[in-house]
Amino acid sequence: MDFYNFYIGKEFQAYEFLGAHVWEKGVTFRTFAPAANRVSVIGEFNGWTETPMNRIYDGNFWECDIPGVTSGQMYKYRIYKNDGSFIDHADPYAFYSELRPGTASVTWTSKDYRFHDKEWQKNGKDRKNKPVNIYEMHFGSWKCPEEGSGERWYTYREMAGLIIPYLKKNGYNYIEVMPLCEYPCDESWGYQGTGYFSPTSRYGKPEDLKYFIDQCHKNEIGVILDFVPVHFAVNDYALANYDGTALYEYPNIAVGRNEWGSCNFMHSRGEVCSFLQSCALYWLQEFHFDGLRMDAVGNLIYWQGDSNRGENLSALKFLKTMNQGLKERLPDVMLFAEDSTPYQGVTKAVSEGGLGFDYKWDLGWMNDTLSYFQSSPEQRKEQYHKLTFSMMYFYNEKYLLPLSHDEVVHGKATIAQKMNGGYDGKFPQARAFYMYMYAHPGLKLNFMGNELAQLKEWSEVGDLDWMLLDFPIHEKFHRFMKELNHCYLEHPALYRHDFEDKGFQWIDCHQEEKCVYVFERRSEEETILALFNFSDQTQEYQIRLEEEYDLLMASDMEVYGGNRKYTKKDKILPAGENALKLSPFSAVFYEKKADQE
């Protein structure tokens, strides 16, 4: 580790020096605790008595070698303050942790694991002008072992055999997992961490997680990790007041705590920045994650996420340094910003004055679109341009369209439940809504359970309502989502030129009274004409085209739960006025291959 870079916030491999490192005859323990009076290692290998650590380098670091210690043994650091009091802390750089409610760190090495994803690393990581369809999941609540098995969760290894076939069958080529660094509270879903370098022991060992990612890559599925560089848990055994002072957090309560009640990282300290960006590189390099989705970026851009309080210049500098450093080391890494602010340049390169992310979550699109579908058909006439507004700013950044876990919890209702009206009317609207989403430019993200038209809000307790597939209306919706996903993956017009204006063209966005929208998506191979009727009435729509378009997909097909019988003869003919009848709450894709021109 470069100590100077560590202090100025430019170190990316601090984990190679700090933490507990297993060697042939024992373990070397090192920690950074500049304000500590003295530090000892306690663990099951010494009967939880103290083995003193020695100051090294400039006196801010502590180290000791303990012979005979092996991988898999619990430990903590006993950190004394100047008044003689002490707290036993978990290791900030621990590579494994005791299963909650236990709080100890665990010595570990998984360097013997050998990845078998060379082909993916060589060819699969380039996603430029390719489809990205992300399935967001919470590892412990997608599917749970049967009652009586004695297990609450499937392991990383078991999950590989369950979810990978599901993803392939249902048309997802990426999976995003909610935070997997160790955390104490199941209800936090991993967003308030205590072990930033430690894969949660809920689902197995570090090498088991490596196996899971390896198997995903073998099946051409990329894996994105939800990463939290903004805040951490308040638990006193972890990062909070680590050396008896506010080492990782701000000492001022006005900025030291946030809306979630957790501690804000102090990005004005280089040591904190080095900790976080070393953590980011650790997950990408050691576990072969393909990308990071960074949570609550708006709270880094502005103090406490409030633009009225001004920009947090230290946090902005940290973001730029981290993103640029990650790109220099791993050029193909995908960096996503979950950011609801209007800050400009989030997806511009740092060298061009931006923050260096590849993609930004389009939360404006998400909020406007869901608000529109929650409104009544009459109100939609007045709100018509909520659905046209996104394309007015879309090319300012590179966007991902998210329907994440945040939209199906805390009284917000599920995506299907958000649709206006009664039970039967929600399904045709949800189908039309999803076709609009997949036709709209931008990468796609859908949270688990949305594809089932789940009507109960998600909870981390239990699993998805898989029994819904026993009901025909839900089974047909599930089939619809599967075929829409594959349609997206297989048709370049829907993704090839997402971020270029040549890939999208409005045909008609002034049918306010009818709530009809028409646009085209284009690529060199094909053009897809997308028509939407978001009213509760059948609408006749006149369209004149110069080429013939064949039916590709329609949300009101009988096989999806609709009431229209389409045939292969359904098409739009060239020249003349084509009078199309658009069913209530419906969407239709027509396709023209390039060789038809």
Image (cartoon, rainbow, N blue to C red):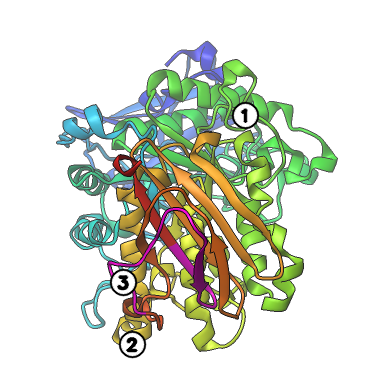
Measured as percent of width and height from the top left, residue 230 is found at: 60, 42
* In the image, residue 596 above or below residue 544: above
Q: Residue 126 falls in which quadrant of the image?
A: top left
Q: Write down the residue under mark 3.
A: 479
N-terminal label among 3 and 2: 2
Q: Which residues are magenta?
A: 565-588
**Which label lies toward us, 1 or 2?**
2
Q: Are marks 3 and 1 in contact (CB under 8 Å)?
A: no
Question: In this rendering, would 368 be left or right of 122?
Answer: right
Q: Are marks 1 and 2 in contact (CB under 8 Å)?
A: no
Which residue is nearer to you in this view: 411 or 558?
Answer: 558
Find numbered disc 2 in the image and state the secondary structure of the residue it sits on. loop
Q: Residue 554 falls in which quadrant of the image?
A: bottom left
**Which label lies toward us, 3 or 2?**
3
Q: Residue at x 26, y 72 (%)?
A: 151
Q: Are marks 3 and 2 in contact (CB under 8 Å)?
A: no
Which residue is nearer to you in this view: 89 or 308?
Answer: 308
Tally the numbered discs: 3
Which residue is nearer to you in this view: 222 or 151?
Answer: 222
Amino acid type indicated by mark 2: Phe
**Which label lies toward us, 3 or 1?**
3
Q: Residue at x 21, y 56 (%)?
A: 160
> Alpha-carbon distance for marks 3 and 2?
12 Å
* In the image, residue 477 above or below residue 191: below
Q: Residues within 10 Å of mark 3 (few under 14, many from 20)?
A: some
* In the image, residue 369 above or below residue 90: below
Does the magenta run of residues contain 338?
no
Find numbered disc 3 in the image and state the secondary structure of the residue it sits on. helix
Q: Write down the residue under mark 1.
A: 35
From the image, which quarter does the C terminus lie in? top left
Q: Residue 223 falls in which quadrant of the image?
A: top left
Q: Write down the residue under mark 2.
A: 471
